Structure formats: C-alpha cells, structure tokens
C-alpha cells in the first residue's frame, strides 16, 4: 500500500502495539564516508537546485510555487499563503543549512517546479534530546503530481541531512502515513464571523442570525491582564527559562536555547507575535503567549481574496490562568484585524478551546518522526511541539 514508506526507517502499521521493539533510533548512523556523495536521479527533464532564500528573486520563485501549489483544505476552498518574510524566518533559524533548501527546476525553462526544506532542531523525546531536522514545505507543482517525485525529494533531503551527521527528523502532514506519533485536531475561533461565513470558512449555526453570531464572538477592545505587553529583546533570557521549564512536562518538545528563543519567539511584524506578563510589582516575567501569521488564499470568491489567520504557537502560564492569557491573545489578534484564530488540541489547549468559543475544524494534523521509534502513540496533550 505504501510502496515508498514501507522502505523507510519509520514506524510501520504492522508494528503498532508491538512493545518488544526498542524505543529510539530504528537504524544506526552509517559512517559519513558511506553516505551517497551524488544527488539522487531526477526524471531527465528536471534538475536539482539549492534555493538561496536570501535572494529576492529565488524567494519570489519559492513564494509563487507555494502560493499556487501548496496545501489546501479537503474541499479546495482555501490554500496556505505563507508570506516571503515568513518563509525567510521559517528557513533561517540558528545553524541552518542552505543545502537543505532544495528545489527542482525544469531543465529547459528553469521554472521552479518542486520544493522541500529542512531546518535543524533539537527535540526532546521523553528524556533524550535528539538532533533532528524539521522537514516542511514539500510541494510538487500541480501538473507534476502522482509521478513519484515526492519520494525522490524526500530521499534527497535525507541524504543532505545525513551529510551533516543528523539521522532523525520530525514533520507533520494532513495525510496519514506510516505512522503518526500523534493525531491532532484543528480548532478555529471566529474573530470576523461575517467574513468567515461569506467565504464559506464557517456557517451560520442552527437558530442563529448574523447579528447574534457577531455578538457571540465579540471581544473587548483591550487586553485584560495587568502587565501584559509585547516581548522585547531583553526578555529573551527570562522567556527561555520560562519556556524550557514549561515544555519539560511534555513527552515530545523542542529543546530551545536563548538563540532559538530569540529567533523563534522575538516578535517579527506579520510573522510572529509574542506577549508576556511582567508582574507590575516584582517585574518578574510570569506568563507568555504567542501566535504566528499564516494567511490563506480564498479560492474563487468574488468579494475576498485572503483569509488572515493567526495560529497559536507557544503559551506558558505560571501565574495568569492560561484561559485569560489566550483570551488576551484573541483580543490582540482581533485588534490586528485577523479573521480567525486557529489552534491545535496539543499541550494544555483542549479544555480552553471550548471555553474560548473555538470550534473543531474539518482538518487534522498528524505528527511524525523519521528513524525514531516511540513505543506508544501520544495523546495530543502530551505533545509540546508546534511546526509551522
Ligand atoms: S506536509 C505538506 C505536504 N505538501 C502538500 O500537501 C502540498 C500539496 N501537495 C503536493 O505538493 C503533493 O501532493 C506532494 C506529494 C508533494 C505532497 N509527506 O510524488 P508522488 C507520499 C510525506 O507520486 P504527489 C510537509 O511538507 C505518498 O504516501 N509523504 O505524490 C512535510 C506516496 O508514498 P507511498 C507524502 O502527490 C513533508 C508518495 O509520496 C506526502 O505528486 C514530510 C507519492 O509520491 C506528505 N505530505 O506529491 C516529508 N504526501 O506510495 C517526509 C504524499 O509510500 C520527510 N506522500 O504511500 C521525512 C524525513 C526526511 C529527512 C530525514 C533525515 C534524517
Ligand atoms: O481550515 C480548515 N478547515 C476550515 C475550513 C473548511 C472549509 C471546507 N473544507 C473549517 N472551518 C470551520 C470553522 C468553524 C468556525 C466556527 C466554529 C466551528 C468551526 O473547519 C482545516 C483545519 O480544520 N484546514 C485544512 O484542512 C488545511 C490543511 C490542514 C493540514 C495541514 C498540513 C500541514 C502541512 C505540514 O507542514
């Protein structure tokens, strides 16, 4: 059934529940001298390219490929529309490798027709911190689908990751592959219900009018928590301590140092927003919340072309109840004109989502590890990792 994935060092469906298999790497690293030195073969009309995302021209080509060919919902009404600034942020974390930003071009026209990326990350699985790559932005042009290009791209990124002496990966997908470590549910909180209904993102509930719906989702103009403010550069050490401490309770979570926190959580306009609570008395940093910006193109609507969505990222509470913190994040997102606030049922989110008037979406997100076996499937609440 999975001609490609059956050949890869990933958990196989037939092994689910076999507790005799050891936890940890599925196959051992090989000496670097044994890693294949040449790229995998592509069909004859295509060639590999390393994408220099610093170059405006290349970044635009990647942006255009993804804008027209990346992930859609199951009814093809919306398509993710990552911005160029977002792509630059996502692809250049501390210690990134340019060689892991891989494109495929048509040999004659030089048109970019496929893409896959890796970025380095330290991820803790139970009590081991493992050097991994996070794989994202796998995309094959719509006209080249179902020609088995994706397996070649995955093997090529694997080879280039191996050349850096890294042997594990983490990734998420909307499709089921061998074998999820967890399956999570998307939840959505309407901020601009009229537009969401007009574009078919949501529906008027039974026995609801538009004006009752607008009233239902109304939010205050201002945040409620005293000491709530935007994160700044000088907060990096305090936020790192807070986040490391908080993430230690999850079975799978990133192992962030200060450089990671500066990159991944310091606010970047229209890319990532982070807020914290500084105690008005002690000036201690006690709580933190963040979201990233990922609009979607609205396919075939007369009146609207993009849906502005915020995605819940990392939230930490020690003093302010998580509910109040997330409510303040909703207030900020509403004030900044987002149409919807999305979140997964990971970490401690699930009980809050219902109280904050989120509703379950029609999409799921499956989490995967490459070449690392864990003995049990995780509950979403045991996951402390958000991929972009
Ligand atoms: S998830 C986002 C994926 N992108 C999209 O959904 C965008 C729209 N779709 C497309 O561009 C294409 O449909 C893609 C497949 C490119 C997805 N992850 O070439 P094919 C398997 C992994 O004929 P196409 C993200 O970016 C499929 O089961 N495998 O198919 C994370 C089949 O194998 P098998 C996938 O439709 C990516 C084979 O590909 C996915 O033309 C993580 C068919 O190939 C998928 N999302 O192209 C990648 N979809 O026969 C893995 C289909 O066995 C990373 N397939 O079932 C692994 C770790 C690597 C690094 C390791 C380092 C140590
Ligand atoms: O956004 C998603 N679904 C929306 C739109 C559905 C449109 C028709 N298919 C949705 N809307 C309902 C919202 C409603 C608001 C009021 C309260 C009740 C709910 O459900 C879904 C997620 O739910 N998104 C997708 O399907 C996009 C793909 C998701 C897989 C992502 C793969 C990631 C790639 C890895 O990097």
Image (tube, helix red, strand yellow):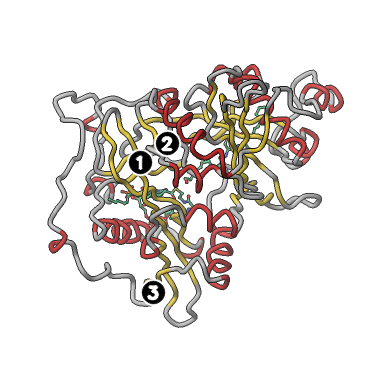
Please give the label number shown on residue 352: none
In the foreground, 291 or 37: 291
Residue 113 vertical placement versus 31 (above, below): below
Percent x, y of residue 162: 24, 56
Q: Quadrant of residue 358?
A: top right
Q: Could you classify mark 1 by the number of other residues whose Cα lies within 10 Å: few (under 14), some (14-19), or many (20 or more)?
A: some
Percent x, y of residue 292: 59, 42
Please give the label number shown on residue 46: 3
Residue 133 vertical placement versus 336 (above, below): below
Q: Which residue is painted at 16% across and 50% down in the image?
A: 29
In the foreground, 259 or 312: 259
Q: Which residue is painted at 37% across and 37% down in the image?
A: 255
SS at badge 1 = loop
Q: Gap in Å between the C-alphas at discs 1 and 2?
A: 8 Å
Q: Is mark 1 within 8 Å of ligand 1?
A: yes
Q: Are marks 3 and 2 in contact (CB under 8 Å)?
A: no
Q: Which residue is mark 1?
A: 177
Q: Gap in Å between the C-alphas at discs 1 and 3?
A: 27 Å
């Amino acid at each position: 059934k999975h001609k490609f994935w059956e050949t890869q060092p990933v958990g196989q469906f037939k092994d689910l529940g076999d507790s005799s298999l050891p936890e940890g790497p599925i196959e051992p690293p090989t000496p670097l001298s044994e890693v294949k030195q040449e790229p995998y073969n592509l069909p004859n009309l295509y060639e590999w390219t390393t994408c220099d995302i610093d170059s405006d021209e290349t970044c635009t080509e990647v942006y255009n490929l993804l804008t027209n060919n990346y992930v859609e919902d199951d009814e093809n009404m919306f398509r993710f529309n990552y911005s160029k600034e977002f792509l630059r942020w996502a692809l250049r974390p501390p210690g990134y490798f340019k060689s892991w930003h891989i494109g495929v071009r048509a040999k004659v026209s030089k048109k970019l027709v496929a893409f896959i990326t890796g970025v380095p990350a330290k991820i803790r699985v139970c009590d081991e911190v493992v050097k991994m790559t996070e794989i994202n932005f796998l995309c094959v042009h719509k006209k080249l689908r179902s020609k088995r290009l994706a397996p070649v791209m995955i093997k090529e990124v694997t080879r280039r990751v191996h050349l850096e002496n890294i042997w594990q990966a983490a990734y998420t997908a909307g499709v089921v592959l061998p074998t999820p470590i967890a399956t999570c549910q998307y939840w959505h909180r309407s901020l601009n219900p009229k537009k969401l209904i007009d574009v078919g993102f949501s529906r008027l509930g039974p026995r609801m009018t538009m004006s009752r719906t607008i009233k239902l989702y109304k939010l205050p103009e201002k945040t409620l928590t005293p000491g709530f403010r935007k994160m700044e550069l000088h907060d990096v050490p305090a936020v790192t301590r807070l986040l490391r401490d908080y993430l230690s309770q999850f079975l799978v979570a990133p192992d962030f140092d200060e450089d990671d926190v500066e990159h991944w959580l310091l606010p970047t306009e229209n890319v990532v927003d982070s807020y914290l609570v500084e105690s008005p008395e002690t000036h201690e940093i006690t709580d933190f919340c963040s979201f990233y910006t990922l609009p979607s193109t609205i396919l075939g609507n007369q009146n609207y072309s993009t849906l502005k969505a915020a995605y819940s990222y990392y939230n930490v509470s020690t003093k302010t109840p998580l509910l109040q913190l997330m409510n303040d994040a909703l207030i900020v997102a509403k004030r900044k004109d987002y149409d919807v606030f999305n979140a997964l049922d990971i970490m401690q989110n699930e009980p809050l989502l219902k109280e904050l008037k989120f509703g379950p979406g029609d999409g799921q997100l499956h989490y995967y590890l490459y070449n690392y076996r864990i003995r049990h499937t995780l509950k979403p609440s045991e996951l402390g990792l958000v991929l972009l």
